[in-house]
Image (cartoon, rainbow, N blue to C red):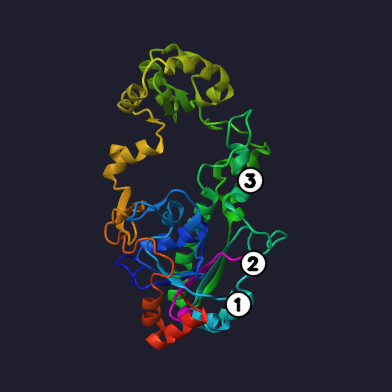
Amino acid sequence: MSGTGALSGIRIFDLTRILAGPTCTQLLGDLGAEVIKIERPGQGDDTRRWGPPYVTGADGRPTGESAYYLCANRNKRSLALDISRPEGQRLARRLISRCDVLVENFKVGGLAKYGLGYEDLRAEFPGLVYCSITGFGQTGPLAARAGYDFLAQGHGGIMSITGEPDGQPLKVGVGIADVMCGMYAAVAILAALRHRDATGEGQHIDMALLDTQVAWLVNEGVNYLVSGRVPRRLGNEHPNIVPYKAFESADGWVILAVGNDRQFARWCRFAEVPELARDPRFSTNSARVENRRALYALMEPVMRRRTTAAWVDGLAALGVPCGPVNDIARVFADPQVRARGMRVEMPHPTAREGTVPLIANPIRMTVTPPDYRHPPPLLGQHTEELLRELVGATAEEIAAWREAGVVA
C-alpha cells in the first residue's frame, strides 16, 4: 500500500538490485510511493547474500538477510517473478499497467529480450515513466559495458583527488557513486511525474553512474575547467580554503574548517598563537593557500596540545567550525544524531529481537514526512497478496503459476 507521504498513490514497478536502483526506489517509498520489488525466484537481489553481517534469527543463527540488503530496501513489497518466461512477461505487463513508474538497472538492452524495454512498452503505456540506471548510459562507446560503483569512482575522477598526496588513489568508503546516481534518478522521476501529470506523457530517463559521478565532481571539476590545471590529491585538505583539514589532537583527531580570515584570527587567539594572524604569509586565505605547508607545520604541534573535546567546545563558542572525527559507533551514540532520530527500528519477521535497526531517512517535512511502513521484505514475501491486489488473481491461477515456476 502507499503511505501518507507526498507520493501516496504513486506505484513503482521496481526491477532494480544492488544499490543505485534500490536507493532510488527506497527514497520514493519513504516519501509515500508504493514500491513493488520484482525479484528472480529462488535468488532475489544479489545483496541479500552480501554478508556478513546478517540478521540474527530466533535460533541465534544468521538468517541469510544481509545488513547490506537491509540498507536500501525498506518500504517495498517483494514479488518473486520470472520474467525470462513468456507467462512471466505477460504477467509483468499486467502489473506494469497498474504502475506509474518502472525503474530498472539491467544492462543496456537487457530487458528488450523479454519484451520489457522502453520501446516495447511506450505505445501500450504512454504515461509510464521508465527509468534506466546503467554504468555508462544508453549511448556512447562504453554503453554496453557493465558498470559498478568502484569503476565509476575510478573512471569518473573522484579517486584521483581522494587520498594522501603521496599515497594511492582511494575510493570513498561507501558506494557513493551508486548512492548519488540513485538520488539523481529519484529527482528525475519526480520531474517526469510532474510532466506526466500535466500532459499525460511519460518518458524514458537515462541515468548513468559515470555521468552522475562526473556531475558531483562539482567545485574540483569546475576548478579544472576554468584553470586547465588537473587537481591533485590533498588528503583531508581543501584546494581553496586553509586551514581546512583533520589535525591530531591530544587524544584523537579533530577537524578544523576555517572559512574566512575572521575565523582564522579567532582560532589564533584561542590557540594562543595570535602572531600567526598577523604574519603576512597567513593573514588572508589566498596567502594561506599559497603557504599551506608552512602554516600546517606550525599548527600541527599546537593542535596536539588539547583534547578533541576542548577544541570542539572552545571553538564552537567562538563560531569557528570544528568537529570530531567519529567512528561509526560514536556517530550513532552522538547526542545530535540521536536527537534527530537517525536510527529507526522496524519489525522483521525472522529477526531474533523481532526488529531490525535501520538508518532513518534524513528528509524533514512538516506536512508529508517520510514514513516507515514495510521492513525490507523477504524474497517473495508479498507475491500472493500483490497478485491478488493488482491483477485480481485467483488462488487457482497463483497455484498454477507457482507450479510452472513463473512466480514463487
Secondary element at tag 1: helix
Secondary element at tag 3: helix
Q: Residue at x 32, y 42 (%)?
A: 337
Confirm whether the magenta stretch covers residue 101: yes
Give the label, 3 or 1, closer to the camera: 1
Query: Would you name the residue on which mark 3 appears?
Result: 154
Q: Callout 2, which amino acid?
A: Val
Q: Which mark is residue 114?
A: 1
Q: Callout 1, which amino acid?
A: Tyr
Pick the quarter of the image with the N terminus.
bottom left
Q: Looking at the picture, how far across and down is residue 197, in whole percent?
A: 43, 75
Q: Is residue 117 above or below residue 360?
A: below
Q: Callout 3, which amino acid?
A: Gly
Label 3 and label 1: CA atoms lie apart by: 32 Å
Q: Looking at the picture, how far across and down is residue 147, in whole percent?
A: 62, 56
Q: Is residue 187 visible?
A: no
Q: Is residue 200 left or right of residue 308?
A: right
The magenta stretch spans which residues?
95-109
Q: Is residue 255 left or right of residue 169?
A: left
Nearest the eye: 250 or 197: 250
Compare marks 3 and 2 and give the one earlier in the sequence: 2
Q: Looking at the picture, how far across and down is residue 25, in whole percent?
A: 44, 63
Q: Residue at x 58, y 55 (%)?
A: 209
Q: Which mark is residue 108?
A: 2
